[in-house]
Image (tube, rainbow, N blue to C red):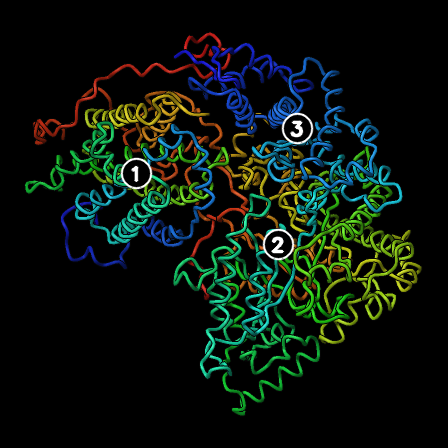
Amino acid sequence: MPLIGKASPEDLNIHSSQYQWARKLYDQAIANTWYPHEITLKEDLEDWSRMTDEEKHAVSFIMSFFNPAELIVNRVLALGVYPYLKAPECHLYLAKQMWEEANHCVAFEYVMETFPLDQAKLYHAHIETPSMQAKEEFVGQYLKRMTEDRYDVSSVEGRKDFVRNLVAYNIVMEGIWFYSGFMVMLSFRQRNLLRNFGSMINWVLRDESLHLKFGIHLILSILEENPDLLTAEFADEIRGIITRGVDLETTFNSDLFPNGILGLNADYVNQYVRYVADRRLEELGLGPYYNVTNPAKWMSSATDVYELVNFFESQNTNYEVNARAHKK
Amino acid sequence: MDIFVTKRDGGREPFNANRINQSIERVCFGLADPVGKVVQVGTDTRFMLYDGITTEELDQATINAALQNVPQDPEYEKIATRLLLKTLYKRILGDYETGEILLIKHREGFGRYIRFGVEAKILDARMVALFDLNKLSALMDMSRDDILTYAGLSTLEDRYMIKDKKLDSLELPQYFWMRVAMGLSYHEKNPVEAAIRFYDRMSRLEYVAGGSTNIGAGTTRPALSNCFLLEIHDDVEHIAKSVSDILKLSKASGGIGASITKLRASGSPLSSNNTTSSGPTPFAKIIDTAIRAIQRGGKKTGALCFYMENWHIDFPEYLTWKHNAGDDYMRMRTANTSVFLSDEFMKRVENREDWYMFDPKDTPDLNELYGEEFSNRYVEYVKMAEEGKLRVFKKMPAEEQFRQILVSLETTSHPWLTWKDTINLRALNNNTGTIHMSNLCTEICLPQNRDSIAVCNLASLNLATHLNPDGRDMDWKKLAETVHLAIRHLDNLIDINELPVPEAIKSDRENRAVGLGVMGLADVVEKLGFAYDSDEAYVFTDRVFEWISFHAIEESAALAQSRGSYTHFHGSGWSRGMVPVDTFANLEKQSRRAVKIDKGGTHAALDWKSLREKVRAGMRNATLLAVAPNANIGLVAGTTPGIDPRFAQMFSRSKISGKYLEINTNLVTDLKKAGIWEQVREKIVETQGDIEKIPEISADIKARYKSAFTVSPYAFIEVAARAQKWVDQALSRNMYLETRDIEEIMDIYMEAWRRGLKTTYYLHMKPRHTAEQSTIKVNKGKEMGKTGFSSVKWGAPSEAERSEGSSPVPEQNKPEPVASAPAPKVCPVDPQLRLQCDSCQ
C-alpha cells in the first residue's frame, strides 16, 4: 500500500501494518501523555512580577502565536494530511497528534488565563500583528490548495502539493518556528525563572519532537515511493519554502525582541533559526544553506542530556504512563 | 547596534569589551589555555547583550557565557564560579583593587555583618556576646572559597545564605560556614574554640550540616531539624490538629512523614451521627493543598510523604493518588506516597497466597504490631473475615497487589517501598513504641505516638574529602575525627533547636535522635579506581560504614558519660549493649527468614566488644546514622549525593536554584590523561552521558564509569545492603531502571527485601524518548536510512517534470519565489575571527 493516495476500504485494515515506524511513534506518543493541570504556576507568578516589561512581552508574544498555531496544525492535519494518507497506522498517530495539539493549545490557554495578562489582547494578537499574520498566511496558502475541489492526490502536481503542505506546516512551522520559540521559552528556565512553565515546555517539546519525526518520516518515505518528485526544480522549490519560512521568522523576531533581554536578542534568535533551518534542510537531503553555528550552547543542559529531577522541587517531566502489568 | 550599559546609579556608558575581557582574564589563573578561554567567554558574552543592559545583568551574562562552554572544557566552570564570587565580594564588601585589600575587607566585614545581624534581630544575640569576632575573622580562610563549584556556590547563595530585605545575600561563603559553626557552639565551655573546630571541617567540605541547620543556625529562629514524623489519628480533632502541625512544621523548613493507616475506610460507619466516613483520601487532599501554601525558607513549598500499610482496605485507591489522570480531588499533586510493607505480605507474595485488606476501624491493633505478633493477629483477622465476623474485607492474590504497586511505581514513581518489619525488628530505639513510618526521604526510622512527633537532625560526611593525599585509600584517622565532631555538632544542635509544635519539642529533647549520613560514595569509588558495581566497591562500602558506625557510636557513648544519656535510653536495644549489626538475629528469628548478607566486620582494629560495654553504660542519642539523599548539600559539597551512583557522565540537574550541567570530572581527568578528551567530548553529549557507546574510549574506563541506567540494579541493592548492616536508621536508596519488564522489576524489589533493605526511595525510569537534541548534529533522515532529495541530479529537469506542464497552482496562491538570495550576513563563529568582525566589536 502506498503511503498516499485515494482512500480505499483496505486502508482500514490495521493488521497488515506496513509502516512500523508510525506504529512505534504512536505507542511512544501514548506513553508521553500529560495534562496541563499537572503543572502548578504559583511560583512562576512570583517570577512574573519580577520580570522586566520586555521579558514579559517576549513570553506573551510567543504564547499568543503558539496558542492559535497549535490549532492551525490541527486544521492542516485534518484537511490536508489525514484524508490523503492511506496507512491506518499513520491515522492512529495523527489522531494522537491532534489530541496533543489540542492539549498544547489548552496548556497555553491555561498559562495565559493564570498569568496577569490582557487576555483579549493576547488572543487577538495573531490577527492584528502583521508578522504573525504573515506566518499564518504562509501555512494557509499551502493548505488552501489541498482543500480545493479539483485537488487530485494521484497527479504529480497533487503529490507535490501534498509535500509542499507537509514542508510548510511540519518542517517550517513545527520544525523551525516552534523550535525557536522553545529555545526562547526555555531560556527563562535557564535563568531560574518560570520553572514550572519550563516543565510544561519540556513536555510540549517532547511531543513536538515526535511530530517532527513523523513528518520527516512521511516526507522522506513519500519521496522514496515517488521518485518522479526528485527533480532539481522541486528540490529548489522546497528549499525556497524553508528559506521563506526563515525570513518570516526573522521579521517575527524583530517584534519579539524590539530591543533585547538578558542573554537574548533578535540577532541571536535569528542565528538559532538559521541553525535549525540548516538541520531541517539536511534532514531532507538538501545541503545546508546558512552555515551558522548554534549560538545557544546552553541548550546542551536544557534538552540534550538526561535531566535528574529533584522531584520535590520540580515537576518530573520524564515519566511515561503506559506501564504493562503483564507481558504482551 | 551600539550597546550602552545602565550603571547602578542609573547612568549610561558605552559597553567596553576590553574591560570585560580583562575581568575574565583575572579569573583564569591556573587554567589551561587562558587566552583561548578569555576570547571564548568574551565573544559569547558580547552576543548576549542588549542596549540598556544593567551592570548586574552584564555580570550574569559573562557567567552564563562561561557556563555554556562547560561541555567543551569543565575548566570553564571554574571561571563561572570565580566570576560569581567576585560579584558577591563586590556587592558585600564594595570595590577593591588588589587581593590584599580584599582580604582585609573580608576580615573587617565579618564582625560588621554579625553585629548588624544581631541589631537587625536576624541573628541571635549570643553571636556577639559569646564570641571574639576579631579572633574568628582572623582565622577564616578565604582561599577555601576556591574549592566550591558553581552549583555549590549558587546553591549556598540561593538556599542557605542569610539575605537582607531586598533578598540580597548578606553572607560570603566563609561567613556562612562560621555563622553555622558559631550557632552550634553556644553551650560549649569554650564557644570560640568549638566554633573554630566546626568551621574548619565544614569549610573544607569534610562534612556539611543538613539544610534546616544551614538556614537556621545562629539566627533568632533556630529551627534546625530536617525531618518530622507524625501519624494522623482517626478522629476529626486530631486530623485538624495535624493539618495545623504540618503547616507549622513545614514553615520551620522540615520535611514530613505522615502515616494515615489509622484513618478508617471509606464507607466506615461514624458512631456520632450514623453516617459514614469519606475515608483517607479527602483528608489527605487537605494536607496536599496545605503544604503548597507554605514557602519553606522562602523558596521550597512544603514537602511530605504519606505512609499507608497495604492491609488498609482503601489501599487500592491510595495507589491512584499520584496518577496524572482522574478526579483532581482524589489526586495528590504535591505530597508523595509510600507503602509500609510487612514480612507477612512479602511472604504471601513469595508463596502465592491471598492478601486480605481490612477497615482499620475493625483491626486497630494491626498498625501497632510487627514481627510474629503481627503475623499471628493478621491470620486471626483473616479467619474472622472468612467466617463472616468482619463488617467488610477485601482479598486478592498477594502477588497481584505487589504487581499493582510496582506498575504504579513505574508510571508515577510512587509509592516508595519500605518494610515495616525490617525497620522494627532491627531497631534499637523502639522501646517507646512501634515505628509506623519512615520520613519524606525514607532514611529515618523513629517511633512516635499521639503525644510525640518524631524529629531527626541531619548532617552528612563527605567521603570525597577524606582520601589520602596519594588517593589510594581513605584517610581513616581523619574520617574518624570528622565523625566524632559531626556527632558532637548534632548533639549540640538539639539544645539550641526551637521547634513550633510541643509534641516535636518533647520528642526531640527526650530522644536526641540524630542522623549522620554520607555523601560522595560513588565519587570516591571512582577515585579509588573501582566500578560502582564491583566487589571492591561493595567491600569498600562495608568497610566505610563499619568505620563510621563504630566512631559515631563511640562518640555518642562518650557524650553520654559527660552529658548524660537520653531520656528513653533504659529499655532500648542500646541499653542491652547492642549495636546495629547485632540486630539481625531478632529479625531472622521473628520473621523466620535468613537475611542474605554476611554479617561480619572487616576492620581488625575496631574493638566492637569493648564498645558494646560502653554502649550498655549509656548513649546520648537514640539514633545516630541515616543516609539522606543530599540533593542540595551534595551540590554544595561538589560530590555525588548520598550513596547514589553517577546519574550519567553528563546530565542536567533541575533545581529550584537553577539548572546545572554536571560533568563527571573524574572521567574528564582520565580522558585527558588518555589524550582523547577533545575527540570524545561531543559524543558524551550525543550519547546523553553514556560512554558505553563511544568506540574511542577503552574498556577499563567504560567499566569504571557506568551510568545509573547501565549499572545493574542489583548493585544498588548490594551497596545499600552492605551499608544497612551498620546504619541504625536507613538509607535513601534511589533506584534507577532501564527495564520496563514488570516481572523483572518485581524480582528486583523482592531481592531488595530479601537482602535486608529497610527502605527504597524514588524510582527513576530511563526515558525511552527525549526531545530532539539541540547542540549536537542530528539528522533524522540519515537515522531512518532515507536519502530524501540528496539523490537529485542538479541541472537537468527530469522526465516527469517536463511532461507535467505548467503548475496548476493559481498565480495569487503561489508561494513567493525565493530568489537565490545570498546567505544573510552572520558573524563568524571562530572566536579569533570574531575579534575582527565589525558587528562583534
The residue type indicated by label 3 comes to Ala
Q: Position of residue B567 (x, y in %)?
A: 82, 64
Above or below for B167 versus A326: above
- Which residue lies at the image location 38% right of the left edge and 35% below the top edge? A182
The extreme left residue here reads A150
| Mark 3, other Cα within 10 Å: few <14 / some 14–19 / many ≥20 | few
Q: Earlier in the sequence, mark 3 or mark 2?
A: 2
Quadrant of the snapshot with the N terminus of chain B: top left
| Residue A186 position within the rendered picture, expressed as x and y whole percent measured from the top left | 43, 35
Residue B178 located left or right of residue B362: right
Both marks 3 and 2 on one chain: yes
**Closer-to-camera residue (B638/B458):** B458
Q: Residue at x 46, y 20 (%)?
A: B53
Pick whichever, B469 or A51, lies toward us.
A51
Name the one closer to the observer, B349 or B486.
B486
Which amino acid, mark 2? Gly
Q: In this rendering, would A27 be left or right of A326?
A: left
B139 to A151, vertically: above or below: above
Residue that badge 2 annotates: B255
Camera-side mark, 1 or 2: 1
Q: Examine the rendering and report whether any part of residue B499 can be seen.
A: yes
Circle 3: element type = loop
Cα separation between marks 1 and 2: 39 Å
Which residue shows up at 23% across the image and 45% down it? Answer: A74
Q: In the rendered view, tell whether residue B497 sits above or below residue B142.
A: below
Q: How far apart are the two marked residues, 1 and 3, measured between alpha carbons?
A: 59 Å
Task: Name the subunit of mark 3.
Answer: B
Circle 1 crowding by C-alpha within 10 Å: few under 14, some 14–19, many from 20: few
Q: Quadrant of residue A178?
A: top left
**Residue to which mark 1 is pinned:** A118
According to the picture, the residue beneath numbered tag 3 turns out to be B674
Mark count:
3
